[in-house]
Image (cartoon, rainbow, N blue to C red):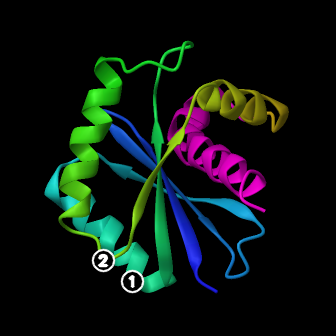
Amino acid sequence: MFRILAIDYGEKRIGIAITDPLQIIARPYKVLANDGINALNTIEEIIQTEKAGKVILGLPVNLAGEDTKKTLEVKEFATKLKSVISVPLEFWDERYTTDEAKKTIKKMNINTREARQIVDKIAASVILKDYLENHK
């Protein structure tokens, strides 16, 4: 089996999470600066290094499931990412993932400054966990 990589896209930062080779556990992996082509190339490097066979990209939609301005931004990012990566990309509804990530961080008793550094990769792991739970 191959690993699955999940992305929580943000204007400033991109959170990355990855599964184990058996696709059972979703773990936070890394936070990248959203610096354009450098971030895209880094994601492809991670895919190659970790032997990921699929990318899950969190898609922010409103509560009714409709596209928002942010949805269009993520879809634009996906188009750019698809031109760089060598594996399939799938969108996944990311409603409430940031809230769930913040709750997780609060339970871990991490201070606010540190939390800002990890919330994106925790959110990516929430997206990935949700994806895995719905694809058993």
| The disc label shown at residue 83, or none | none
Q: Nearer the viewer, residue 25 or 130?
A: 130
Amino acid type for the residue under numbered disc 1: Gln
Residue 55, percent across and down? 46, 63
Quickly name the residue at label 1: 48
**Badge 1 density bin: few <14, some 14–19, many ≥20, Cα 10 Å:** some
> Element type at marker 2?
loop
Q: What is the number of callouts on the image?
A: 2
The quarter holding residue 69 reads top left
Residue 101, percent across and down? 67, 34
Is residue 106 toward the left or the right of residue 32 in the image?
right
Pick the quarter of the image with the C terminus: bottom right
- Residue 59 sits above or below residue 125 on the image: above
Amino acid type for the residue under numbered disc 2: Ser
Q: Nearer the viewer, residue 54 or 97?
A: 54
Pick the quarter of the image with the N terminus: bottom right
Magenta residues, start to end: 110-136
Is residue 81 toward the left or the right of residue 54 in the image?
left
Q: Is residue 62 magenta?
A: no
Quickly name the residue at label 2: 86
